[in-house]
Image (cartoon, rainbow, N blue to C red):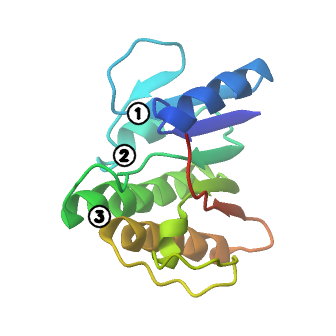
Amino acid sequence: MNIILTGSEGFVGKYLRIKLEELNYNVFSIDRIKINRVNYFCFDLTNEISSLVSLFKDESIDILIHLAAAKGDYNLKYKDFYRDNVTASDKLINLVKVLNVKSIIMYSTVSVYGHDNKIMSEDASLKPNNPYGATKLESENLFTKWYNLDPNKNRLTILRPSVIY
């Protein structure tokens, strides 16, 4: 199985990449950090996707696992969250369309529910109350729109973890 993994050098990405490779999956890692490793591509996901298309045009990509994001604990401005969470997701959706990828796992956040310290379920209303949650929800909506283009063939899983440590 061929997997594109974005955010491969973040906390979750590093461990996930290692595990996927141990399971003999072919992982193409993408992140903005400059390192030298087989199947690693230093790329800003908000750039034009044409260079990524040429990299993967001869590969049959089975799944995109999208971990890359601007996180809520970095004291970023709204425009930074929008750029890294919404613009990057929009570009990735264009990439999966061109590459005909039919399965996506998108790593989101419980911040899409807002922070009011109440116990909630997945059925709770989506009411983000900070730029991180708002832009992650906007990103989720873009991936949901992609899924709805062909729900009989496209597969989408959105994960909303609370705390990772």
> Amino acid type of disc 1?
Asp
* Residue name at image x 61 percent, y 62 percent: 160
Q: How far is mark 3 from mark 1, CA to CA?
A: 17 Å
Report x, y in % for residue 120. Answer: 65, 78
Q: Residues within 10 Å of mark 3 (few under 14, many from 20)?
A: many
Q: Residues within 10 Å of mark 1 (few under 14, many from 20)?
A: many
Report x, y in % for residue 85. Answer: 38, 59
Task: For the C terminus, give its image quadrant.
Answer: top right
* Occupied quadrant, residue 105: bottom right
Tell whether label 3 touches label 2 (CB within 8 Å): no
Q: How far is mark 1 from mark 2, CA to CA?
A: 8 Å
Question: Residue 4, relative to residue 100: is it above or below?
Answer: above
Number of marks: 3
- Near-viewer residue (130 or 56): 130
Q: Earlier in the sequence, mark 3 or mark 1?
A: 1
Q: Can you identify the residue that label 3 sits on?
A: 82
**Residue 57 shows in this picture:** no
* Residue name at image x 59 percent, y 38 percent: 4
Q: Residues within 10 Å of mark 2 (few under 14, many from 20)?
A: many
> Amino acid type of disc 2?
Leu
Report x, y in % for residue 145. Answer: 56, 76
> Amino acid type of disc 3?
Tyr
* Residue name at image x 75 percent, y 27 percent: 25
- Near-viewer residue (106 or 150): 106
Q: Earlier in the sequence, mark 2 or mark 3?
A: 2
Q: Can you identify the residue that label 1 sits on?
A: 31
Report x, y in % for residue 144. Answer: 59, 73
Which label is found at residue 113?
Answer: none
Q: Nearer the viewer, mark 1 or mark 2?
A: 1
Q: Can you identify the residue that label 2 sits on?
A: 45
* Residue name at image x 46 percent, y 41 percent: 53
